[in-house]
Image (cartoon, rainbow, N blue to C red):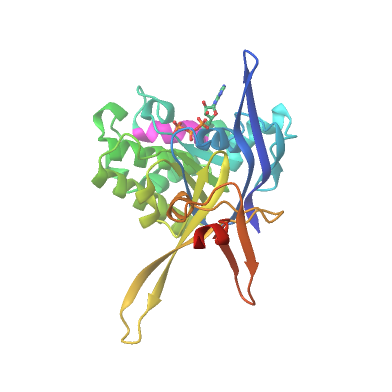
Amino acid sequence: MSDILCRGLVRIFATDGVEVQALQGLDLRVEAGDLVAVVGASGSGKSTLLNILSGLDTPTGGSATVAGTDLATMTARRRVRYQRRTVGFVWQQTSRNLLGYLTAEENVRLVLDLAGGPRRARAARAREVLDLLGVADLADRLPGRLSGGQQQRVAIAVAVANAPRVLLADEPTGELDEATSVEVLEALRSVNEATGTTTLIVTHDPTVSEHVARTVQIRDGRTSTEVLRRRSTDADGTERHVAEEFAVLDRVGRLQLPHDVVEALDLRDRVRLTLQPDHVQVRPDRDENQEAR
Ligand SMILES: Nc1ncnc2c1ncn2[C@@H]1O[C@H](COP(=O)(O)OP(=O)(O)OP(=O)(O)O)[C@@H](O)[C@H]1O
């Protein structure tokens, strides 16, 4: 079952008569329990996608469904419930994740208290998630007295406290150095493994693909390529990680060729397609007679 399903998602911003198509028919499917990274350059539409998935913005066209909730038609009341119960968020800036005047534990307690339930169970749950993120010993510290990586781990604890179906992380490593980024990505991965929470990480950092099994590239408001990593065992029993890049085909058969492929063959305007028994050939549209001359 898919926990995140976007079909032909369109978001157009109109300011002073100028239209910007931030999302241009984006397709994305994430199965329940999976961890997926969405990677793209600045301006590719990542934040726009995440704002829609988190219920902060609504699409201009197409559809977006998260854990069975249709985000385009959600009522204001349903939106509050969706944001409190169905999805958890981790943002890039600590100030957006944690209240600076509350300790790590109080930050977790706050979201649990808003959701209600027996008081004792809430206290136990707060300890449980801080423990899960390896920050139980920092429970009494204010965010200002935590390192960047520790702050993000507490932020993940806050985000998963109410056991959301889906965890959305927007540039969770954007303000961290390389070693700390790896630590936070590994924390997201271990929470995903331990709890089965469907997780979507949005980032401009292409090295994230080294840490997750599936990375989807977004370009000009559409998903363009995907990198899948899997473990493979050699004949001699050695285990290796194999990464393979795929182009993404949308529902009507459109394909975006990666930039390096287009440039390597100087493909422009039109290409020649030849259907082979088990593959399709794409060649430049050069006039062969002219070239022979
Ligand atoms: N509120 C808005 N009004 C007008 N244009 C917008 C608005 N939000 C985003 N855009 C435009 O939509 C496009 C996609 O923006 P978006 O912020 O989603 O990209 P991004 O991939 O998240 O980039 P970055 O990594 O720099 O945040 C950009 O051209 C941006 O200028």
From the viewer's perspective, is 235 left or right of 116?
left
Q: Horizontal and vertical percent for residue 152? A: 35, 38
The answer to whether residue 74 is left or right of residue 139 is: right
* Residue in the picture at 63% in, 37% down: 82
* 6 part of magenta stretch: no
Quadrant of the snapshot with the N terminus = bottom right
Q: Nearer the viewer, residue 288 or 157?
A: 288
Q: In this view of the protein, can residue 58 be seen by the observer?
A: yes
Q: Position of residue 122 (x, y in %)?
A: 49, 40
Relative vertical location of residue 293 with respect to residue 59 in this rendering, above or below? below
- Is residue 197 at all visible to an observer of this figure? no
* Prevailing SS of the magenta stretch: helix
Farthest residue to the top: give it: 16
Residue extending furthest bottom? 235
Marker count (numbered): 0
Residues 286 and 2: in front is 286
Q: Is 129 situated above or below 236?
A: above
What is the x, y in percent for residue 26?
Answer: 62, 44
Q: Which residues are magenta?
A: 104-112
Residue 120, x across and y down, in percent: 48, 41
Q: Front-most of 285 and 197?
A: 285
Residue at image position (35%, 23%) is 100
Q: Quadrant of residue 143?
A: top left
The part of the image, by quadrant, that contains residue 78 is top right
- The residue depicted at 48 percent of the width and 32 percent of the height is 43
Compared across the picture, whether 82 is left or right of 35 comes to: right
Horizontal relation, residue 199 to residue 148: left or right: right
Which residue is drawn at the image coordinates 68% and 56% (left, top)? 253
